Image (spheres, grey):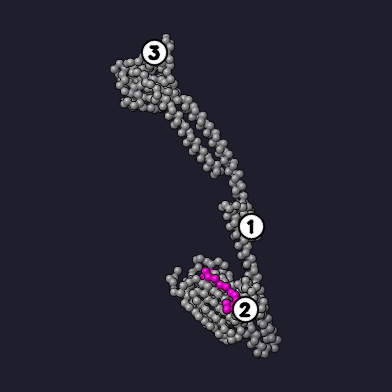
Amino acid sequence: MLTAAAVAVAIAVVAAACWLIVRDSLYKQARQSLASAEPPNSPAQSRVTCATSVDAALAKVKAIVDERPFHQNKYDNQFVGVNGTVCFPIGSTRAIVSVPDDLTAATGKRPVYRDGKYADGTPAMVRVWGGPMTSGGEAVVLLTAVSVKDVQDSLNSLALLMTGVAGLGVIGAGVTGRLIARSALKPVDQLTDAVEHIARTEEVGTTIPVNGKDEIARLSTSFNSMSTALANSRERQTRLIADAGHELRTPLTSLRTNVDLLIRSDAQGRALPAETRARMLGNMKAQMQELTVLIGDLLQLSRPDTPNPEAVRTVVAFHDTVGRALERGRLRGPSLVFDTEVNPWFVHGDPAALERAVINLLDNAVKYSPPGGTIDVRLRAGRLTVRDRGPGIPAEELPLVFERFWRSPSSRQLPGSGLGLSIVAQTVRDAGGQVALGPAGDGGAGTQAVMVLPGQPERPEER
């Protein structure tokens, strides 16, 4: 409908412009033809018939013509006097309707042209010529007219023709526009069907074919990307719930077993040895601590994968954050040697999340370092490296270290949930940095973690 309306407006404008141009051209030709007509002499010098009314003057002219035929002129002439006298040269047979302005419109030597008509209603182009013409001492003006009936008939035929062509054009444009629109909007129908299918079945991941590079193709591509992202998000959510349930089940089972054993021993009156009871309570405390850490990690990972642009980010003295993390790391590895070099570096980010990320890297190094080993910690120009002397990570396992709940088969007997490095990766990504884990740079034993954060060595203004 919009296409048909646009075409109708365009055709109407073009048709109207063409009609006006043709009309102006035809009337211009009529005026030029009228301008070339030689005016007759004044009534006093030519054979004219005058009367006080048009009908009387025409009757006299007709009587003279009947007695002696005269050649009829192509143009009709008529003298009009100021006092109402009307004179017709011999040969004129039609009266020209005069208007009051004729007596004052052509007082000079140049004629004036106007649209007019004959007494019988036939349209005409009229030339009004004044000047020093008199009839019996009375000033008169000369009206010369030519019929434009053929011009108007041609214009009417042209208008009718253009109306028909415009109507056919609008109908054709409407039909063609509908066919083109249905073909062009077919991907939108497919997109609608896909959206309705997802809303009805909740089967995310449905895609539609993409053809071309126009806006509809871009919309289809965006929808496919969104649908794929939703499917991946649901898969990650399902995997997270399954992995979290598995990780939570282990400490809960251990806690339930220990609690059941304590309750059964008290119920049977057979108290456990003090050493066994203390060991069980210690195990229960360790399991509760592990649950606490796991729940905290899950809460940390429950945040969106993409950073929130509206989140409050403050200026963080990253070197102080690393220093506090080192203090906690020394407590967790009292037999280890920490070789540190920490230079000032300020970044924008979440202070608590950044400190937790650094602690996770140090915990990872402490966990895999041999007794009495050395851990190198360097912070230079926003590049934090944590290197241990442990057994290292096999090359085939390096791409998996930042996956949630992933743990190396050789380290599953050690405490942990497999979420620490995932939290590090998410925190660094939120801060606009990068993190990587690989073999030691000097080719020796151990693993080296590298965290790079954008910032500067001097405190910037708060954002």
Seen in the picture, residue 434 relative to 281 is either above or below; the reply is above
Q: In the image, what residue occupies the spot 50% across and 71% down?
A: 454
Residue flagged by tag 1: what amino acid is it?
Thr
Label of residue 207 in the image: 1
Q: In the image, what residue occupies the spot 36% across and 14% down?
A: 47
Q: Nearer the viewer, residue 13 or 299?
A: 13
Residue 226 in the magenta stretch? The answer is no
Residue flagged by tag 3: what amino acid is it?
Lys
Seen in the picture, residue 181 relative to 340 is either above or below; the reply is above
Q: SS at mark 2? A: loop
Write the start and end of the magenta stretch as one range: 430-443
- Residue sticking out furthest to the top: 67
Q: In the image, what residue occupies the spot 54% across and 71% down?
A: 434
Whether residue 364 can be seen here? no
Label 2: few (<14), some (14–19) or many (≥20) C-alpha neighbours in 10 Å: some
Judge from the rendering whether residue 395 lies leftward or rightward of residue 84; answer left or right.
right
Residue 36 pos. (x, y %): 40, 24
Label of residue 60 in the image: 3
Mark 2 or 3, nearer chain start:
3
Q: Distance between the residues labelled 1 and 3?
A: 95 Å
Label 3: few (<14), some (14–19) or many (≥20) C-alpha neighbours in 10 Å: some
Label of residue 392 in the image: 2
